[in-house]
């Protein structure tokens, strides 16, 4: 990517160079004045969301990487909320996928219904982490640690982003991530399609991102991408793991 | 420094054939022991290879203490966590030597979850002529034993044995990024993304959690631990770095759980360089105390910084490793290179620091003269005992002869791990699946 494009990501520059009356003109005017900047920012946001989505599909993503990407998304979202373009972005998404919000609200509310295996599997993962933590504590004879939580409060062992109940910004942000949560919960055949339809490809070429990631030496991505190709494998794997976990838990309970 | 470097020679290089190189061969850590006699490497395949420096030979003065393979063993195997339905890679994340206390050598090696203590020892004699059992080890019939016989030690071919002495497992939920042996030589710590545990080297079933930054609600997580190290002399002091570019110094005497740091080292962000990538590039990938323990060196994506323990608000020295990448951050984010974890090392006298870059380049900074040099570890450009030529990356404008343009750098060839001999100018550089050892020219 040429260097000039990159410099456009420099935060704050546009506000300095803009007319001081920009606030009165409203956020839309500002967006119009610097179209390339917003375009670049948009593509960065899209790129980050794809990366984040891929992170969430891994059982144990590189935590440092996912935290840094999520913080980047937060930053962009904050800035977009300030200049009002977040609303447009959000609107565009909602228009395109009107059902997303309904689904995600359902997920975020953590209804007790266990409709699909994906969710149950997640819960199990969460449970197993707690189990492991407990075991570790026992073995180590450590003093009680504050991080131990009641099981029902653990949304997932996977690292997740913002909580919905915070301030306005975060509520907006949550909406942007709704699709991520959705794909996170539904580890089935359609998740790959969901993932790709999520991105507005007019802004940037998804292939480039994926090729870039494939080219990376970190095994995780390649493994993950490969595992996507036969879509049915994931869910059937879940099933087997599930039974195994069931079995193990039984043993643990019996002993 | 440049003069020094010009005279550097390749003493020995451990080269595996490119055509046979696999993912498992990629070197993931390099570490000299405290005398520099041994050099250990760990790879993605879970193997540890130890090199030993050969004794100087007066008949062959040009062969000055080359490093040869001493021992190879499989430290970690791939595992499967059935509860989490998760594969645990065998990749060796770090190796740390213990100070030598007898004829045997001890080292700690770790993958994402489990630390192991290995004993590496030599055997060149074996006992023969037992009275109570025969040569195959079977007990003799006591009736047949009529005389007193004492077993004798007979010489045999030298054998180097590696045996696992301790396995420290089940204490890390996240990925271990650092291990550090304490100066009391009795304890060590292991750090993962969110917690640091303290272990006694003798006790495997108990560890003490000394740092825990895991938020009660994981949704609030914005920062992770990236590296940690004990102070070289004060056994109660350690530092850990974070993904937000801060370094925390903790004192274990103040409380059992070091939730509150004693010192926080952080440099204010430069407003002129602020971008969406600011936080990512300020994330610290390595932290190292100098030999005296007065200074700390940290590596972030674009720079190496030296901090004085007595000054928390800014580093005393900042060195640009590859500033020409600042204009490429978007592409580097896109291809994930921006998350690469480069390490950094001090030389024996703390006057020079070394760290890696892309295109098989690595950098050295002379702290006194403020001169720096870029060198290349590549098979094509270096034959045994060849002299290393400084390389230059051209930034914009016209490219001079011998210069390489930023756009033609190979980002798949990265030097993440390097090591410096504790007292001599011998360095080990891991370039993907090759290990290069360079040293000062003999006279």
Image (cartoon, rainbow, N blue to C red):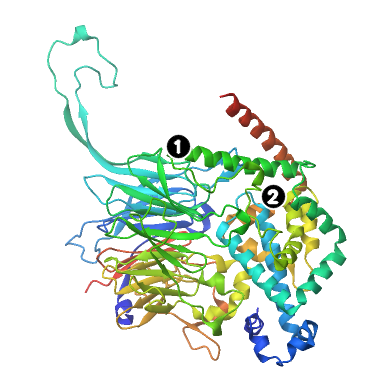
SS of the residue under disc 2? helix
Q: Is residue B113 left or right of residue A158?
A: left
Q: Which quadrant would the N terminus of chain A be assigned to in this image?
A: bottom right
Q: Residues within 10 Å of mark 1 (few under 14, many from 20)?
A: some
Q: Identify the residue position indicated by label 1 in the image.
A: A139
Q: Position of residue B5 (x, y in %)?
A: 33, 77
Q: Earlier in the sequence, mark 2 or mark 1?
A: 1
Image-quadrant location for residue B205:
top left
Image-quadrant location for residue B363:
bottom left
Q: Nearer the viewer, residue A47 or B295?
A: B295
Which mark's residue is nearer the viewer, 2 or 1? 1
Q: CA distance from mark 2 to mark 1?
A: 35 Å
Which chain letter matches label 1? A
Q: Are marks 2 and 1 on the same chain?
A: yes
Which chain letter matches label 2? A
Q: Nearer the viewer, residue B117 or A13?
A: A13
Image-quadrant location for residue A121:
top right
Q: Is residue B41 left or right of residue A236?
A: left
Q: Identify the residue position indicated by label 2 in the image.
A: A227
Residue A62 visible: yes
Q: Nearer the viewer, residue A114 or A245?
A: A114
Q: Which quadrant would the C terminus of chain A be assigned to in this image?
A: top right
Q: Position of residue B403 (x, y in %)?
A: 48, 83
Q: Residues within 10 Å of mark 2 (few under 14, many from 20)?
A: few
Identify whether B115 is placed above or below A244.
below
Q: Position of residue B351 (x, y in %)?
A: 29, 74
SS of the residue under disc 1? helix
């Amino acid at each position: 990517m040429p260097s000039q494009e990159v410099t456009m990501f420099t935060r704050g520059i546009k506000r300095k160079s803009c007319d001081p009356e920009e606030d009165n003109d409203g956020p839309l005017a500002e967006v119009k004045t610097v179209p390339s900047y917003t375009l670049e920012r948009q593509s960065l946001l899209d790129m980050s969301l794809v990366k984040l989505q891929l992170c969430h599909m891994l059982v144990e993503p590189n935590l440092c990487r996912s935290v840094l990407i999520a913080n980047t998304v937060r930053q962009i979202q904050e800035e977009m909320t300030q200049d009002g373009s977040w609303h447009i972005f959000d609107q565009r998404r909602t228009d395109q996928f009107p059902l997303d919000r309904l689904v995600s609200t359902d997920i975020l509310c953590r209804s007790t219904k266990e409709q699909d295996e994906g969710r149950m599997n997640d819960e199990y993962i969460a449970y197993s982490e707690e189990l492991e933590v407990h075991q570790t504590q026992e073995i180590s004879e450590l003093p009680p640690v504050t991080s131990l939580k009641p099981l029902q409060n653990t949304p997932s062992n996977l690292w997740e982003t913002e909580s919905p109940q915070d301030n306005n910004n975060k509520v907006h942000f949550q909406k942007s991530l709704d699709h991520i949560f959705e794909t996170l919960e539904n580890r089935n055949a359609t998740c790959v399609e969901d993932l790709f339809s999520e991105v507005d490809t007019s802004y940037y070429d998804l292939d480039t991102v994926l090729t870039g990631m494939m080219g990376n030496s970190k095994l995780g991505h390649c493994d993950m991408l490969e595992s996507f190709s036969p879509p049915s494998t994931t869910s059937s794997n879940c099933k087997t793991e599930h039974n195994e976990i069931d079995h193990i838990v039984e043993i643990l309970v019996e002993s | 420094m440049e003069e020094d470097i010009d005279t550097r020679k390749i003493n020995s290089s451990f080269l595996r054939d490119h055509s046979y190189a696999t993912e498992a061969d990629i070197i993931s850590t390099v570490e000299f022991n405290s005398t520099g006699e041994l050099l250990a490497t760990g790879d993605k395949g879970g193997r540890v290879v130890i090199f030993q420096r050969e004794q100087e030979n007066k008949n062959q003065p040009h062969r000055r203490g080359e490093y040869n393979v001493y021992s190879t063993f499989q430290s970690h195997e791939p595992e499967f966590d059935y509860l989490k339905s998760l594969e645990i890679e065998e990749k060796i994340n770090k190796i740390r030597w213990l100070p030598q206390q007898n004829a045997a050598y001890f080292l700690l090696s770790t993958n994402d979850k489990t630390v192991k203590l290995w004993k590496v020892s030599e055997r060149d004699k074996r006992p023969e002529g037992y009275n109570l059992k025969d040569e195959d080890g079977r007990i003799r019939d006591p009736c047949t034993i009529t005389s007193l016989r004492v077993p004798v030690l007979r010489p045999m071919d030298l054998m180097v044995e590696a045996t696992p002495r301790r396995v420290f497992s089940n204490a890390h939920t996240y990925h271990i990024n650092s291990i550090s042996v304490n100066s009391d030589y009795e304890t060590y710590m292991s750090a993962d993304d969110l917690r640091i545990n303290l272990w006694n080297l003798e006790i495997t079933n108990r560890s003490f959690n000394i740092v825990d930054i895991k938020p009660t609600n994981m949704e609030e997580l914005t920062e992770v631990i990236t590296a940690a190290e004990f102070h070289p002399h004060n056994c109660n002091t350690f530092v850990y770095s974070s993904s937000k570019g801060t370094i925390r110094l903790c004192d274990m005497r103040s409380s059992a759980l070091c939730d509150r740091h004693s010192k926080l080292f952080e440099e204010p962000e430069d407003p002129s360089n602020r971008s969406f990538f600011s936080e990512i590039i300020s994330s610290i990938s390595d932290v190292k105390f100098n030999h005296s323990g007065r200074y700390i060196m940290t590596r972030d994506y674009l720079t190496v910084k030296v901090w004085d323990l007595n000054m928390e608000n800014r580093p005393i020295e900042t060195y640009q490793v590859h500033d020409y990448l600042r204009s490429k951050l978007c592409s580097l984010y896109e291809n994930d290179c921006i998350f690469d974890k480069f390490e950094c090392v001090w030389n024996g006298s703390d006057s020079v620091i070394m760290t890696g870059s892309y295109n098989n380049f690595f950098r050295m900074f002379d702290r006194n003269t403020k001169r720096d040099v870029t060198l290349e570890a590549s098979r094509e450009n270096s034959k045994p005992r060849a002299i290393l030529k400084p390389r230059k990356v051209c930034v914009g404008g016209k490219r001079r002869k011998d210069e390489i343009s930023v756009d033609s750098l190979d980002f798949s060839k990265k030097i993440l791990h390097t090591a410096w001999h504790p007292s001599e100018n011998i360095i080990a550089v891991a370039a993907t699946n090759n290990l290069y050892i360079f040293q000062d020219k003999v006279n």
